[in-house]
Image: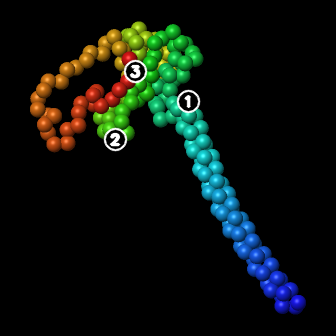
C-alpha cells in the first residue's frame, strides 16, 4: 500500500514538474513575444515621430532660403494667391533612388529655383520679396523655358554614361 502511494505521488510530482516546465516555456515564449512587440512598438513610435518631423520640416520649407520660403508661403496664403507658382524645382520632379545624388549634384542650388507659369507671376513674386525685404530668388517662367535638343555626339558610347538628366527624371505635366 505504501509503495502504491509512493509511486503515485512520484508520478504526480513528475506530471506537475512537466506541467510547470510547459508553463514556464509558455511564459518565456510570451515574454519574448512581448519583448519583440515592445521593440516593434518603439520602432513604430520612432518612425511615426520621424514622419511627423519630416512633414513639419516640409511644411515649413526647411532647407530652403528665406526668399524661397517667403514666396512659397505667400503663394499658399498671402498676396501671391492669384499667381501661378508651382514650387521649387526640387519638388516638381522625381527620379529613381539610384540617380538622386547625381541629379542633386547636377542641379546644385538650382533646386531652389521657383517655377512659375509666366513672367508676370515671376514679377509679382519679385515685388512681394521686395516689399518684405526677403531677399532674392530665381524664377523659371514656363512661358520662357525652351526645350533643348542634344545632338548625337557619341557621348552615350562613353564608359559610365547612363543618360541625359532630363531622361532620368519624371514630373507631372
Q: Is residue 30 left or right of residue 66?
A: right
Residue nearer the viewer, 15 or 79: 15
Q: Earlier in the sequence, mark 2 or mark 1?
A: 1
Residue at 14%, 34% in the rendered image: 155
Q: Position of residue 112 (x, y in %)?
A: 40, 28
The residue where tag 3 is placed is 172
Q: Is residue 86 left or right of residue 53?
A: left
Q: Is residue 39 visible?
A: yes
Spatial CA distance of label 1 from label 3 is 20 Å
Quadrant housing the N terminus: bottom right
Q: Is residue 9 above or below residue 76?
A: below
Q: Is residue 108 visible?
A: no
Residue at 56%, 39% in the rendered image: 51
SS at badge 1: helix
Q: Quadrant of residue 57?
A: top right
Q: Position of residue 25 (x, y in %)?
A: 68, 68
Q: Is residue 56 above or below residue 16?
A: above
SS at badge 2: helix
Spatial CA distance of label 2 from label 3 is 20 Å
The residue where tag 1 is placed is 59
| Label 3, residues with CA under 10 Å away: few <14, some 14-19, many ≥20 | few
The residue where tag 2 is placed is 98
User: Mark 2 or mark 1: which is in front?
Assistant: 2
Q: Is residue 22 above or below residue 134?
A: below
Amino acid at each position: 500500500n505504501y509503495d502504491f502511494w509512493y509511486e503515485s505521488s512520484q508520478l504526480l510530482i513528475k506530471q506537475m514538474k512537466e506541467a510547470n516546465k510547459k508553463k514556464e516555456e509558455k511564459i518565456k515564449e510570451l515574454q519574448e513575444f512581448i519583448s519583440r512587440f515592445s521593440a516593434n512598438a518603439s520602432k513604430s513610435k520612432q518612425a511615426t515621430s520621424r514622419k511627423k518631423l519630416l512633414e513639419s520640416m516640409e511644411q515649413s520649407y526647411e532647407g530652403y532660403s528665406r526668399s524661397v520660403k517667403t514666396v512659397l508661403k505667400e503663394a499658399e496664403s498671402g498676396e501671391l494667391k492669384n499667381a501661378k507658382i508651382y514650387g521649387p524645382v526640387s519638388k516638381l520632379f522625381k527620379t529613381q533612388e539610384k540617380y538622386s545624388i547625381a541629379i542633386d549634384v547636377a542641379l546644385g542650388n538650382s533646386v531652389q529655383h521657383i517655377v512659375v507659369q509666366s513672367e508676370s507671376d515671376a514679377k509679382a513674386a519679385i515685388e512681394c520679396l521686395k516689399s518684405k525685404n526677403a531677399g532674392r530668388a530665381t524664377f523659371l517662367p514656363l512661358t520662357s523655358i525652351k526645350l533643348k535638343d542634344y545632338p548625337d555626339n557619341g557621348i552615350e558610347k562613353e564608359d559610365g554614361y547612363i543618360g541625359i538628366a532630363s531622361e532620368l527624371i519624371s514630373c507631372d505635366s
